[in-house]
Amino acid sequence: MSIYGALRFLWTYLKPLSARLLLLVTLMLGATGLRLLFPQLLRALVDNALAGATLMVLLVPAGLFLAGAALIQVLRVSAIMLSERIAWAATNSLRFDLARHVLHLDIAFHKEHTPGELIERVDGDVTTLAGFFSQFIGQVGTSLVLILGVLIFLFAEGWLPGLVGLGSFLLNATVVLSVSSITVKAWSGIRASSAEMFSFVEERIAGREEVKASGAASYVVRGLVGMSSKHWRLRLRARFLESTASNLTVDAWVLSQFAMLLLSFFLYRNGSLTLGTAMMLFFYADLLNEPITTIREQMDELQRARAALGRLVSLKAVSPSITDGEGTTLAGGPLAVTADQVTFHYEEGRPVLNGLSFHLQPGQVLGLLGRTGSGKSSLIRLLCRQYDPQAGAVQLAGIDIRRLRLDDLRSRVGLITQEVGLFGGTLRENLALFNQNVTDQQIWAAVAGLGLTEWFGRFEEGLDSRIGPAGGGLSAGEAQLLALVRLSLRDPGLIILDEFTARIDPVTEALLQTAVDRLLAGRTAIIIAHRLTTVERADQILVLEQGEIVEWGPRAGLAQDPLSHYSQLRNAGREEVLA
Amino acid sequence: MSGFSFVRRLYGMMLPGALLTALGFGAGAGLGAVGAIMTSRFFDTLPGTTQVPVRYAIAFLVAWVVSMLTEYVWLYGITLMDRFSTTLLRVNMLQGIYRRPGALPLSVTPGEAITRFRDDVQESSFQSNRFIMSLVHLGVSLGMFAYLFTIQPLLAAIGLATVGVIFLIMRRIQQKIVIYRDKVMERTEAVTGYLGEIFGAVAVLQVAGAVPDALRRFREVNQAREEVALRERLQWGLLHAISQNGFYLGLGLVILAAAPMLARGEFTPGKFAIFQLLLQQIGWRLWGISESVAQFQAMGVYRARMAELAGGDEPLVNRTALHFTEELPPDPAPVREPADRLSELRVNSLTYHHPDSGRGIEAISFAIKRGSFTVITGKIGSGKTTLVRTLLGLLPLESGEVDWNGRTVAEPMAFFTPPRIAYTPQVPKIFSGTVQGNILMGLDSGRRRPACSPGARSCWCWMISLRRSTTRPRRSSGSGSSPTRVRRRCACPIAGRRWSRPIRFCSWMRAGWLRPGRWVSCCRPRRRCGSCGRLWRRRRRCRLWGDGLSLSVRRGGDPGLARGVVAAGRLTCRNDSCCRKSLTNAAMLLNP
């Protein structure tokens, strides 16, 4: 993206902070002004001393120098603190914006982008910008002021010192501008090589069972050394290039000091300069290096920030394809489910559901069976509007779900899959999903309603008990129990259970079955089951094969018909048909 | 191991780099001081009538330019050191991880492990390697003070005192920074950890309509980090201000003290210039020293964190031969010794319990003969996988023993590797890279074309006829930060379902064919994916597996050749009627 585009994007986050920015610039200008005065004080001191002034006269510039040095400290610390506050305020609002944006994007987007990648965008890239937010404007601004000030003071001493100063500045600026591309080039490839190395290590740690069983441990170690060699070859090149770039700027600065020394020599010998002034000119030339280096560093920072910014802007440009409907409301109570000629595919030419139609009465339980790939889970995704069908419609209580607001739909449809989604935090936060309006009484009522009060006794600190990140400390079955409580708190009209018993141990299973029975009472439900015992409670059975219905009817009837798919499955007891 | 001996051990292994660094850096610093002295001489000689000042100006220029050139010397030295120390620490940590039983969870999450591999290694080795530069800083600073003392002892003492006070203040600030930095790291981990959780569970949050509440929580954890970070930044601000401008304070005091001497004509402007220029240089050398001291103290934390993965302080800094080459020669194929030929595998009262749940296996004993095919089956949680893992040394056995041809295996983990076994774990792992690389896992690809049987050949042909060629990079199934060059995720039941077959198949090929084992263990071959069943049968037709016995872990109810049934951690059934029925089925499958 262009620099202008980058700055405009940043400005949207800096604009609310413009008052603080103004204060920051003022503080930095104050510090810069003081630094410009130091060489003047030195000249006064040296020239007065050489002229044989009294001690009292000499103490004035010396005292001013000391006071100025102390004041600079105060100004700088205040400026740094202010700039950090600005940076954190701006980046945190950017982080929040991005997280909100990402969380509202489709499941299809999240299938393509791993959490790790998104964290890198929302936190990593934004952190890269932080330095830029806090520093760029203040640093570049004050550096320019410092340069301008030095040039003004030099020209005030005569056009020759002024011209030498201007020449030095131009030389420095030219060098800085021409080497800035070197440093950017130096770092290209290093990030990639380091990412490659650490993803190599990460995968080989995660897959250590396989690595060890293959006897490939030493090969992996050699692979790591090889990647490290490549990384450090690039790093050495980058260090040399960077050093060349910075050396060139320092050389330009040394050259300008040298020029100033020669000029002082000639002017002093002409008698048109005092010794104090000669020293002052030298120290002004000395001052020129720092702002130019600062600007160079900030330009590098800008280059880095631009890459990060480009990624952020393109992330923000992604828009969800699933959007709110016009806002028809759903009635309370159990919901009827209708699929009307639903056709759906993830990729053109590979149909997943093919003109699927069925109608489920409110309050009934549907058992959904079929091989892997038959389209069961895709049907569920359509019901939750994680995707929209290409043709046909999914209706709840006779209303096309595309006409509902997403929040409304999601408050009425509850889904439990194998992935419970537990967060590091208290039991309360996990059950209420961070909703602070849910009271403890409501939670305990839901627990009691599912017959889990006794089981909850295992949490010694009650709802304040902490659950580790990713649900650590709980078995898969126990996590499912929490998911049931979570769902029951929301009182949905349609409950979907998607292979949620797949990983459950026998002890928890009994507990879970009771809880599910209670949860499903008086609600419409769809169950995709890993085990046939789980669909025993279904009123209707639907068997899918390659996106089409091969069987649909009341479970009791199908169970009695020995030729039905359902009966055959039951008799064969071959669970892999279901899984 | 103290921070000092840690650094000493590392330096002992990279002396040439350290010497080069010290030499180059010392020369550069010395020349910088020479440049300053030449400037002062220039001003001292300016009032005269000779051309000497011009010579001093030229000397000033030359000193600086040469000092720039020395930078390449020490950069080369320090890069040698950085390369060696980061690689050594990482290799030792990885080897430490591989020394642990493979199925035993690490004491840290994979994300934390990577943080240690990346940040802890970089921080600790960079700091330890820059320690030598701090010594140079210290030496040069002392030299400069010595020089200033020869010019004017009182002023030098004032300068030294100020610099000393500034140094102490800097040290104090840096100690605080270390404390705050740990807090910031903690809160940052909380932020990224929380982001990972909500991005990982985005479907759950969306379907539950909990996105706004989750975002509110995100704002809270972010603000918690901001508070600590601002405190840390305040310390940094103080540190920067004092290090960059602190010397002005010293100079101010020097000027104040010098004023009477200037008035009496005892002190020249040139001497005055040398004080200004050298104090400035000492000021920023101080920064390097102070930072180094602070990092030195923090190194203990890094070292402990790294040693945890490496398996102790000693293994962490163990001298390992590192051949820095980007070429990666393949491993020789595992050699089949006649002694490895299995006649019987016997397991005696094998016991292992998972530390967190207490579940596991209890006193399991059985014997398996050459050429047999055993299915371990039982309910979920009964200990099937635990049994196989304990047997293979992927979990540390609590008691019991494993006998291979009548001899007790002392270290199952080291012993059960190819060619003695071929093993595919329950959840096969595919690494980023090519399919071929995934199958070979370091073996020579030269004569690895399938030659064993027509069946194997057809398998190979089938595999390379997959939608992409075998050399095309493939993305791993699990990791979050792997390169994004491959678009699809491989998780079996979701969008990338088509890749489940290659994943499973790679794992089989890797284990069974290219490293033909005496004994094959295959965990839940049909798990996760119905279409794997077809491959399973195809594999069986091919007879890819070795000449030994096969052992399969299945969920209850599967047809298969069963000799033992494990339920609730105990061997409860052997050769009963259901197993016999399975035996017949399996025999039919094996001899179509």
Image: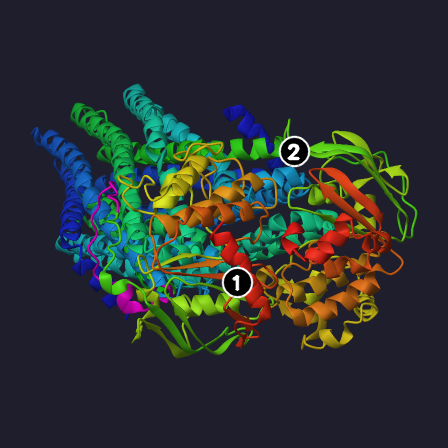
Q: Position of residue B569 (x, y in %)?
A: 54, 75
> Are the numbered discs 2 and 1 placed on the same chain, yes or no?
no
Q: Is residue B312 magenta?
A: yes
Residue depicted at 85% across the width and 47% down the height:
A553
Residue depicted at 17% across the width and 60% down the height:
B12
Crowdedness of circle 1 by 10 Å Cα count: few (<14), some, many (20+)?
many
Mark 2: secondary structure: loop
Given the image, what chain letter belongs to the residue carrying mark 1?
A: B
Q: Position of residue B13 (x, y in %)?
A: 17, 58
The residue that disc 1 covers is B583
Mark 2 vs mark 1: give the one in front: 1
Residue depicted at 13% across the width and 30% down the height:
B58
Residue B300 shows up from this direction: no
Residue A153 appears in which quarter of the rendering? top left
Tell me whether circle 2 and circle 1 mark residues in contact (CB < 8 Å).
no
Q: Position of residue A83 (x, y in %)?
A: 52, 44
Looking at the image, residue B440 sits to the left or right of residue B351; the answer is left
Looking at the image, residue A531 sits to the left or right of residue B235; the answer is right
Q: Position of residue B367 (x, y in %)?
A: 41, 73
* Image: B59 above or below A156: below
The residue that disc 2 covers is A346
**Disc 1 marks which amino acid?**
Leu
Label placed on residue B332: none
Residue A547 shows up from this direction: yes
Report the magenta residues as a range: B306-330
> Which sits in the foreground, B311 or A203?
A203
> Which sits in the foreground, B544 or B299?
B544
* Image: B63 above or below B230: above
Distance from Cα at disc 2 to Cα at disc 1: 42 Å
Given the image, what chain letter belongs to the residue carrying mark 2?
A: A
